[in-house]
């Protein structure tokens, strides 16, 4: 039996000057390495962003009004021991909200954007650059060429690459030199209806590639891989052919293999033509290698043909899905799942490329109440309440550089419900093993795999609270991310009761724990 655990580290307090001749230099506290900030509800704006071994940034939007219709956002930089290094604020235009971040070398870049209803013609997005040490702030104002929503944000060597798609399905790429403020807008697909799906930037050459879905009609689309020079000049454009009109690409990503080779991979579904339901049913994964913008091949792998799918579905579920598929057409050879998937970034590991996707379903419950009509007669009203998205599991498919499936694996998730459609599972390579971990209800679920083999089944570690007298009542918007080396950050909102005080002594906090993966 292999011992696997996540350890909550403990605070080692820094030297503290005391009155008189006696001085207590160090004190080992029983308090876990954890930050707690009092919150009114789980809807507040606290966030953390790990910045590698340099530390982490915690920030939030205050209610303080600054000049020029701006609101103060506060930023705290913590070192690896969760000791606060500095606290600073920056005025951000009040109509803008935080959307995305990028970390490169020693600088964290935060992207703030207004929705189309609150757009300002002069400034509709801002990028705050934070040089972690000594804590220098640089704020760039920007205007998109037309109303649009950011779907991709990358920063490499002080150049920001911002992908935008507007309501009319026109895609634009904005290249912004942050030191000078000079920008260049590139219209993708010649201004034809399209949606930007994914962006990859070469950190050496600043050549960037984009995956774009082009709309031929309401039911017909094509996927393109386009490469551009940093000045916006197009290098190449290639259609990602699927060799089958009955398949659609629904989630896509790209990974570099070499300077000239790349891998396009993601999730596909059966063609939506003729379907009455608007819900997209996932069918499987695809992988297609490209060499100098030329597609070499494409491979499709149905989820229901993978051995690991039995981790997420029972044999009865699989049989029912196949019967459902056969009812549509007696010639049907593909089977689709009933849930949607969130695609992770492609993970290069041990000469393979891991395509990981998390399955979720919207969850509802029905509530009823009694009302009375004009004559005083009772009647029952029933309505449906959305509870959030239930995440049921993660499936992994590893392919080689030729797009051939090498192995697959999966992990079931336990009672994970969230209003945020963001990945819940963290993938962490450790030698020839891969750790899959997630945080939910105050526990860290962890599984270790070695390719298709499960080395250690899912085990659960309790996340330490600030005091032994604390009892977790509820947890909201929790997440777990890799920080550096074998360390992780767990954060979210928790409702906690101090059982030593009795009564109804509860508090709502935003928390952040540093944990160590230990074998």
Image: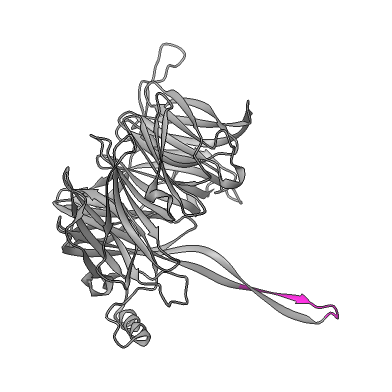
Main secondary structure type of the part rendered in magenta: strand
Q: Determine whether 41 is above or below 295 in the image.
A: above
Q: Residue furthest top?
A: 21
Work out whether residue 425 or residue 516 is closer to the camera in this orientation and state it: 425
The boundaries of the magenta stretch are: 367-376
Q: Residue at x 46, y 47 (%)?
A: 492
Q: Percent x, y for residue 167?
A: 52, 53
Q: Percent x, y for residue 131?
A: 38, 25
In the picture, measured across the screen, residue 479 lies left or right of residue 94, that is left
Q: Determine whether 474 is above or below 164 in the image.
A: below
In the picture, measured across the screen, residue 466 lies left or right of residue 257, that is right
Q: Determine whether 169 is above or below 410 in the image.
A: above
| Location of residue 61 by image quarter | top right
Asked if one can make out residue 357 in the rendered structure from this viewpoint, the answer is: yes
Work out whether residue 445 or residue 392 is closer to the camera in this orientation and state it: 392
> Is residue 252 a member of the stretch shown in magenta?
no
Work out whether residue 208 or residue 89 is closer to the camera in this orientation and state it: 208
């Amino acid at each position: 039996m292999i011992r696997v655990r996540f350890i909550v580290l403990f605070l080692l307090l820094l030297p503290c000057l005391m009155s008189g001749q006696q001085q207590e230099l160090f004190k080992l506290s029983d308090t876990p390495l954890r930050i707690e900030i009092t919150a009114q509800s789980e809807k507040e704006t606290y966030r953390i962003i790990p910045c590698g071994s340099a530390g982490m940034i915690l920030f939030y939007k205050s209610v303080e009004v600054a000049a020029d219709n701006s609101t103060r956002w506060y930023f705290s930089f913590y070192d690896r021991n969760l000791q606060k290094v500095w606290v600073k604020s920056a005025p951000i235009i009040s109509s803008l909200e935080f959307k995305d971040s990028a970390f490169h070398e020693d600088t964290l870049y935060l992207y703030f954007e207004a929705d189309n209803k609150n757009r300002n013609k002069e400034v509709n997005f801002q990028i705050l650059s934070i040089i972690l040490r000594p804590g220098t702030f640089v704020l760039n104002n920007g205007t998109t060429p037309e109303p649009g929503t950011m779907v991709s944000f990358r920063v490499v060597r002080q150049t920001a690459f911002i992908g935008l798609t507007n309501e009319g399905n026109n895609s634009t790429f904005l290249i912004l030199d942050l030191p000078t403020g000079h920008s260049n807008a590139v219209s993708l697909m010649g201004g034809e209806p399209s949606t930007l799906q994914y962006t990859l930037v070469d950190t050496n050459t600043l050549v960037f590639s984009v995956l774009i879905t082009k709309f031929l009609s309401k039911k017909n689309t094509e996927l393109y891989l386009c490469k551009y020079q940093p000045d916006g000049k197009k290098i190449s454009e290639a259609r990602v052919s699927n060799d089958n009109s009955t398949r659609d690409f629904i989630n896509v990503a790209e990974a570099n293999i070499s300077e000239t080779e790349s891998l396009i991979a993601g999730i596909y579904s059966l063609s939506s033509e003729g379907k009455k339901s608007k819900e997209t049913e996932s069918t499987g994964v695809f992988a297609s290698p490209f060499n100098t913008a030329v597609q070499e091949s494409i491979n499709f792998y149905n989820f229901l043909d993978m051995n690991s799918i039995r981790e997420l579905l029972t044999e009865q579920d699989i049989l029912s899905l196949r019967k459902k598929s056969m009812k549509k057409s007696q010639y049907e050879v593909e089977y689709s799942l009933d849930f949607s998937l969130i695609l992770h970034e492609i993970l290069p590991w041990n000469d393979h490329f891991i395509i990981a996707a998390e399955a979720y379903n919207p969850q509802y419950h029905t509530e009823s109440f009694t009302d009375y009509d004009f004559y005083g007669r009772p009647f029952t009203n029933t309505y449906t309440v959305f509870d959030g998205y239930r995440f049921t599991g993660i499936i992994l498919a590893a392919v080689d550089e030729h797009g051939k499936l090498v192995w697959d694996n999966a992990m079931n998730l336990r009672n994970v419900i969230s209003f945020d459609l963001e990945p819940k599972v963290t993938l962490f390579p450790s030698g020839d093993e891969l750790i899959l971990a997630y945080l939910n209800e105050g526990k860290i679920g962890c599984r270790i795999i070695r390719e298709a083999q499960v080395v250690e089944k899912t085990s659960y570690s309790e996340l330490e609270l600030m005091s032994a007298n604390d009892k977790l009542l509820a947890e909201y918007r929790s997440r777990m991310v890799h920080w550096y080396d074998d360390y992780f950050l767990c954060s979210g909102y928790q409702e906690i009761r101090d059982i030593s005080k009795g009564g109804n002594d509860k508090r709502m906090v935003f928390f952040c724990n540093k944990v160590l993966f230990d074998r």
